[in-house]
Amino acid sequence: MKKWLSFVSLIVALSMLLSACVSQVTPTAEVVQPTDVPVEATAVPVEPTAVPEVVEQPTEEPVAELGPVLKIGQIGMMSGAMSLYGLQQTRGFELGLEYASNGQKDADGRWIIAGRPVEVLVRDDEGNPEKGVQLARELIESEGVEILQGPVASAVAVALTTIALENKMILMVDPAASAFTTGANFNPYVFRTARTNFDDTLVIAKYLVENVGKKFAHIGIDSAFGQGSGVALKYSVEKFGGEVVADIYAPGDTTDFTPYIQSAMDSGADCLFLTWAGTGYVTLFQQLADLGALDVMRVATGYGDNASFAAVYGSAIDQIGLNVYHYTVPENPINDWLTEKHMERFNEPPDLFTAGGMASALALAQALEETGGDASGDALIPVLEGMKFEGPKGTYHIRPEDHVCEQPMNVLKLVNIDPDLNDDGVNEYQFFETVYVSAYDELGVPCTLVGEYADRCGDLPTIPQ
């Protein structure tokens, strides 16, 4: 049995909110006019009946008038190799807004947050940074968007940091994992609920060094995400006494991984660490097996999305690996609600990045409640910095220094690759036994701020220069 330990890589849209403002009007009693019918006299005078006392009914307080519509621009990869992640992002974000609004909608079906109906405008960046920037500008200038959320591709996230700064608006990053967005490309308007490359490597590096070997090769996708993972891997492995002896990158559209795999095999590494995303994962694993790499090195990567799981991890039963989120792991009411609603709506459980989309919505909603619906960057920054909130993975904490979002991470044992164990026609994807779940604040993710922002790191751990 080959061990494939995990270091992840990889990586919603909403709609509506209730409650049109309705003023309550107290009905007035109808006055009945007397008729002209004559009354016949009687021998005994009739005492006049008492006029019934009119009891004034209290009026209900009118429903508070709603504020202006808040438009959020959600940019993600809705087509192409990682479109599944974009779908997870949009679904999670929509469900997060529903949860945060307590189900309140306006007359047009928009979820209400902090007294404002929320409209999410979803755009497909196709994984292209230039297109992502273009879409962001259009959303801001033509649609009046006040907050940006997303994207899937880390290269797009890095590009969008400049847009956030230029417009002094919040960019809430998720699911893009590169630490560069809250490191070298940081500015005060950039926040994240996505984990970083360092979360991935730190949670599993100690296990790998102690149980696999001290020499590591790395094959990564040649992108901001892959490069960031290379930095994170080096830091994490060295922290526990290991060494990266080969750091190798391949283009995202690679179909023949032979030269990259051969370089890793020639390096003398005990463990091969993979940082990839999208459908290329399947090809990469097939070629690792074909070239005999799995016989001479242990492969470590992240347990990914449910849909492609069996194709990628078919030979990894009983192995231990890293995972960002799997719906079977967290034990809390928010994850229970998310799972139930997702099953009702989509006939399948939430997936790898659904939780991240929801976490973004919950963080923004909590901050907006505190600002009274003021979505300006300068109003939201002091509220988001240092904010702790509960989400589908448990407790999240946005560090005030660098806006990294500390959160739980999983180490899991793969025990099954059959998506539908009970043969009821619905894929439950119950693949894992839980080995370990980190506390949100235990990993010690380093602060990677540079230049004018470097002093913000304060007492946080940093990468040795």
Image (cartoon, helix red, strand yellow):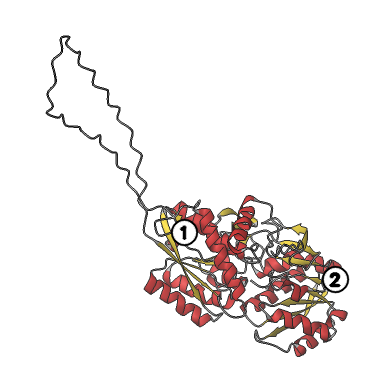
Residue at figure coordinates x 39%, y 61% from the top left: 69
Q: Amino acid at mark 1?
A: Leu
Question: Would you call the spot at circle 1 few (<14 residues within 10 Å), some (14-19), or many (20 or more)?
Answer: many
Which is nearer the eye, 191 or 400?
A: 191
Q: Is residue 21 above or below residue 225?
A: above
165 with respect to 222 (left or right): left
When asked about the image quadrant of residue 413, the answer is: bottom right
Residue under label 2: 212
x, y percentage for residue 315?
A: 82, 74
In this rendering, the answer to whether 167 lies above or below 248 is: above
Question: Residue 22's x, y, as percent?
Answer: 34, 49
Q: Are marks 1 and 2 in contact (CB under 8 Å)?
A: no
Q: Whole-percent x and y of residue 133?
A: 48, 78
Judged from the image, the secondary structure of the residue bearing numbered disc 2 is: loop
How far apart are the two marked residues, 1 and 2, measured between alpha carbons? Answer: 45 Å
What residue appears at the point 61 percent right and 77 percent down from the top-left corner? 82
Q: Is residue 412 left or right of residue 56?
A: right
Q: Please indicate, yes or no, whether residue 440 appears anywhere in the rendered image.
A: yes
**Residue 221 placed where, x, y %?**
67, 81
Reply above or below: 171 against 363: below
Give the mark nearest the N terminus, 1 or 2. 2
Circle 2: residue type: Val
Residue drawn 42% across and 58% down? 117
Q: Is residue 401 visible?
A: no
Q: Which residue is mark 1?
A: 380
Secondary structure beneath label 1 = helix
Name, please, the residue furthest toward the top: 44
The answer to which image quadrant residue 95 occupies is bottom right
Residue 354 or residue 250, whichever sits in front: 354
Disc marking residue 311 = none
